[in-house]
Amino acid sequence: MAIEWDRIGQPQFDRIIEALVHRLYEATAEVVHPVNGRGGDGGIDINVRQGERLRIFQLKYYPDSLEGRGRRASIKKSFKRAMEHEPYEWVLVVPCTLTPGERTFVEGLAGDQEVRITVMDRAVLDDRLAAHSDIERSLARTRDDGGLLEYAKIMNREQDILAGGTDDLRTRVHELGRVVDDLDPHWTLDFARQGAAVIQTLRGKHPRAQEVSPIAIRLKSRAQGIDADLAAAMERVLGFGAGEDLVLPPEAVERLTVEGPEWIAREYSNVGVVWRRGPQQITAGTEAEFAFLADDDAVTASYRGELTDFGEGTAGRTLALTIDGVNLQLMMPHSPGVPSTLNYSLEIAGRDTGTALRAISLHRRLLEDGRFHVSVAGHVVCIGNLTESTSDEALRDLADLRELVLDLEAVQRHCERYFPVPLEIPARERVLLRLARRLVDGSSVINPFAKSLKCTLNGTGAPVLRGLLGSAGMFQATRPNCPVTIGGHTLDLGPVRIFHPRITVDDAAKALAALDTGNFAGLELTLRPADGQCYRVILDSALETIPPEQPVPPAPYALDGYPEPA
């Protein structure tokens, strides 16, 4: 239904054109700025800036023609003032249809000036508004019956049975959505039903909805309903704009007030609030870098990752990155002189060993004093100084973690079996991992889990067996494989030599008696290192580079808190 331009009056005309211009340039203009002409507008009613180009819209409510007393003079005066701003285009907006003579007058205002002149008259306005019909319907709610008869018909249909099945449901939801769209020229509500709850989400019809038609939400909390964790979350989300959801239970909310257009303005009590931040200008996933600087600002180390969050609140800004398993959150206050806060956590489980080692190195640098800068998409966004604040115990823990990953990396490389760092490595597996690392490095090592060895005789080698049973002596044997299991993954280190310089045999007298009879096939022997010690192991491949006469002393485990085995 076309607007009755000659009946709506100047205020309604201005509101319609303002809403229309916002909608036309929502995607391309950096600035759409309506100016109240009552204080002297300099010839501008609405200006639109797109880069270096300025468009000036001059609104004149002349519903019949330009031929009234003083009308042409007023247009000339407005045009002359507008030219002081050097616009790319000057647009005259009128609700009448111009005659050829009136159009010639308007287009001739430019003279020798380099400016584009455009007329938006009744025909153009009707055409543009046809594509944005909700503007007229939303503003029509304030006059006559406001379309209430049509809305009543739609609502009555909501009470019907769904005779047409889901097609009827889609149609009726669409019609109800049209009613909601007509509430306001700048805002609408998206809605959904989830069980017994109806979820309503406020959405701007264009990017400048908040500028043109502000909506404010004021929250008064109850101190007794806010614990330390919730207070910290409120500071992060409300104070610094962190991207996490803030959930306030009803006991923490005394009053929630929504201020704005009449259709949404309301005060609530006994409600829970979920605060969820909207989309940001900087997209998560953008490349980011954390660089450490020398005193002369030269980069001494840098780590690349990606931006995970960027937001702003009442107290400051939040910048969050993830780099190789380190999650960093930098909270920067607006107030000068107030120190920023850097929160970070290390998470290497599930990452490959190379990534995990970089994460540990980054974490270690974050514990030291020094300058740094953060860049996003190649642009430095903040520069700061780190203050050392850690304990010797924390440094030892980090060093132990690095040693664990280095061991895992070396063993995986030797076996050509690659898998992520396990979530947990029990103490036994940690010892086995260090044992495996010593072996692949070519060392011999004491196996603390090998205190005895059982073997079954095949009835041969009696002279050698008599020497072994007679006194503690040297023993060695070769196994074709050496499997170790770490984090559910079994890695085979290859053929391994098991040995000890002094071996004793359980029930040696019984075994000697069997040898005397010559019937010792199938006899089981238990061999133990002397003095309660453990067997030693070395990879066969390492023995190829060691002269036979050279002793092979065991390498130490050197694990913090673990006593060396004998």
Image (tube, helix red, strand yellow):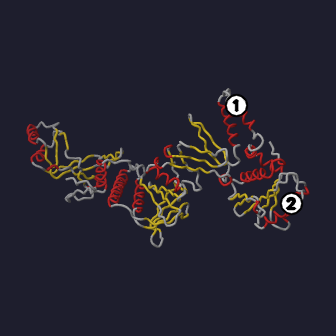
Residue 116: image quadrant is bottom right
53 on left or right of 443: right
Left or right of 49 in this view: 226: left
Element class at badge 1: helix
Out of 324 and 308, give the one closest to the viewer. 308
Q: Which mark is residue 533?
A: none
Q: Is residue 554 above or below residue 470?
A: below
Q: Around disc 2, counting alpha carbons within 10 Å, would you say few (fewer than 14), some (14 to 19), or many (20 or more)?
A: many
- Please state the horizontal and vertical placement of residue 539, each as a whole percent of the image: 28, 52
Up-down relation of residue 103 to residue 188 (above or below): below
Image quarter hosting the N terminus = top right
Q: Which residue is mark 2?
A: 106
Q: Single out the mark in the foreground, 2 or 1.
A: 1
Along the line of sight, which residue is nearer the eye, 212 or 541? 212
> Which quarter of the figure has residue 360?
bottom left
Disc 1 marks a residue whose amino acid type is Arg
- Kindly identify which numbered label has been placed on residue 157: 1
How far across and how far down the image is residue 204, in percent?
A: 65, 49
Residue type beneath disc 2: Val
